[in-house]
Image: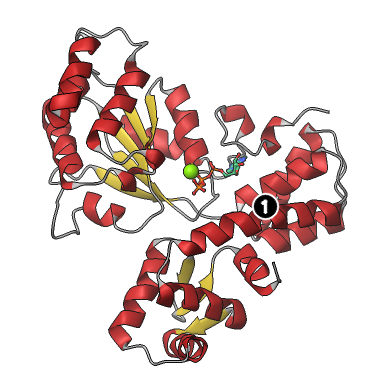
């Protein structure tokens, strides 16, 4: 049996394979048509890349994955590569040569020739430097080019939305769009729809258990559905997803500093806690005191990275991804 598209573990590229209960695609298209530049912000594995890829196909735009891009020249090269099949008035060879010497000018030249194309930049935090902001400003003032971004890391939205002291993007047509995990009902619908399309049977109780286990994270639900569609029974499928999660989550945690890592560990113990209690547990694990501002800073980093959720109302903090707890509390 082949892989059913709705449970395909790669980012989706076609609208039909994307489960869109909230019509998030339409909302983003509307923003782009209204000349706003959406910035998708959300926890890992919630479909940001899928959304950008699908929309770039639907709107005949240009998709650029900036996750491996370190420099503006690198970004320019990717843009150029993805523009090769377009009919442009400008000679791309000239731009290519210019890129090696003056990347900012070259990118500006390229953008000014892209008419009203939409450029989708995934993981934009990698290229969000002051130079990048200036390129956006020039594009905004002198061309019809539009952008949409994603970035789940810290710093990006601050720079782009002009809250950073170092670099400000003055035009500010950027609108943050939060991509959230699904609620229980949407998760149930997703698994049911997938089971139907893949002609498999997932029992009610198994669906309930999966929904509880993956707490609305589309990526984990997709992996689970994919293993089920390959014929694995419920428990084995869960085990296989957890094995994958173990490697992925280990790497994600490594990106953080010592205090952030310890806060994550603390949250696997207490599930949900207010600032003061969370600080105490973190200090106990760390076996030293942390000053208030360092603790707040670390906690905010985790909130900005959408690893930790701060619940408005009772001001409690909790981990967004339920598998962080499972991974950290079981031996490797
Ligand atoms: N709405 C959806 N319908 C179907 N599958 C989805 C949906 N959203 C996400 N997925 C699946 O979940 C996984 C993660 O999606 P994707 O890579 O697009 O998310 P992401 O937010 O870009 O993740 P990351 O932050 O790790 O880059 C993929 O397997 C994708 O196919
Ligand atoms: Mg992604």
Report x, y in % for residue 69. 34, 38
**In this orientation, does residue 192 appear?**
no
Q: Nearer the viewer, residue 270 or 178?
A: 270
Residue in view at x 33 percent, y 33 percent: 32
Relative vertical location of residue 74 with respect to residue 294 in this rendering, above or below: above
On the picture, is 141 further left or further right than 239? Answer: left
Residue in view at x 26 percent, y 21 percent: 116
Quadrant location of the N terminus in the rendered image? top right
SS at mark 1?
A: helix
* Quarter assignment of residue 89: top left
Label 1 CA crowd tier, 10 Å (few <14, some 14–19, many 20+): few
Q: Which residue is mark 1?
A: 244
Report x, y in % for residue 295. 36, 81
Relative vertical location of residue 261 with respect to residue 236 in this rendering, above or below: below
Report x, y in % for residue 127. 28, 43
Residue in view at x 58 percent, y 40 percent: 20
């Amino acid at each position: 049996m082949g892989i059913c598209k709705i449970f395909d573990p790669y980012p989706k590229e076609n609208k039909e394979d994307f489960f869109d209960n909230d019509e998030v695609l339409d909302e983003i298209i509307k923003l782009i048509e209204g000349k706003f530049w959406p910035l998708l912000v959300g926890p890992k594995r919630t479909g940001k890349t899928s959304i950008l890829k699908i929309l770039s196909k639907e709107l005949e735009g240009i998709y650029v994955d900036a996750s491996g891009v370190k420099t503006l020249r690198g970004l320019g090269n990717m843009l150029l590569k993805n523009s090769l099949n377009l009919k442009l008035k400008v000679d791309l060879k000239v731009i290519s040569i210019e890129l090696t010497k003056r990347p900012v000018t070259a990118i500006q030249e390229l953008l000014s020739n892209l008419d009203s194309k939409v450029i989708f930049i995934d993981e934009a935090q990698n290229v969000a430097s002051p130079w990048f902001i200036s390129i956006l400003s020039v594009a905004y003032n002198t061309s019809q080019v539009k952008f949409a971004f994603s970035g789940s890391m810290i710093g990006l939205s601050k720079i782009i939305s002009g809250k950073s002291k170092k670099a400000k993007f003055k035009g500010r047509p950027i609108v943050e769009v939060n991509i959230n995990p699904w609620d229980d009902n949407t998760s149930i619908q997703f698994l049911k729809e997938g089971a139907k399309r893949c002609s498999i049977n997932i029992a009610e109780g198994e669906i309930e258990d999966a929904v509880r286990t993956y707490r609305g994270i589309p990526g984990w639900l997709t992996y689970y559905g994919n293993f089920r569609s390959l014929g694995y029974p419920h428990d084995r499928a869960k085990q296989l997803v957890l094995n994958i999660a173990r490697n992925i989550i280990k790497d994600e945690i490594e990106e953080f500093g010592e205090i952030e890592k310890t806060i994550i560990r603390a949250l696997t113990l207490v599930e949900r806690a207010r600032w003061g209690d969370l600080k105490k547990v973190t200090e106990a694990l760390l076996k030293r005191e942390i000053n208030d501002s360092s603790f707040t800073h670390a906690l905010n980093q985790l909130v900005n990275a959408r690893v930790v959720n701060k619940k408005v109302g009772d001001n409690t903090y909790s981990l967004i991804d339920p598998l962080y707890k499972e991974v950290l509390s079981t031996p490797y």
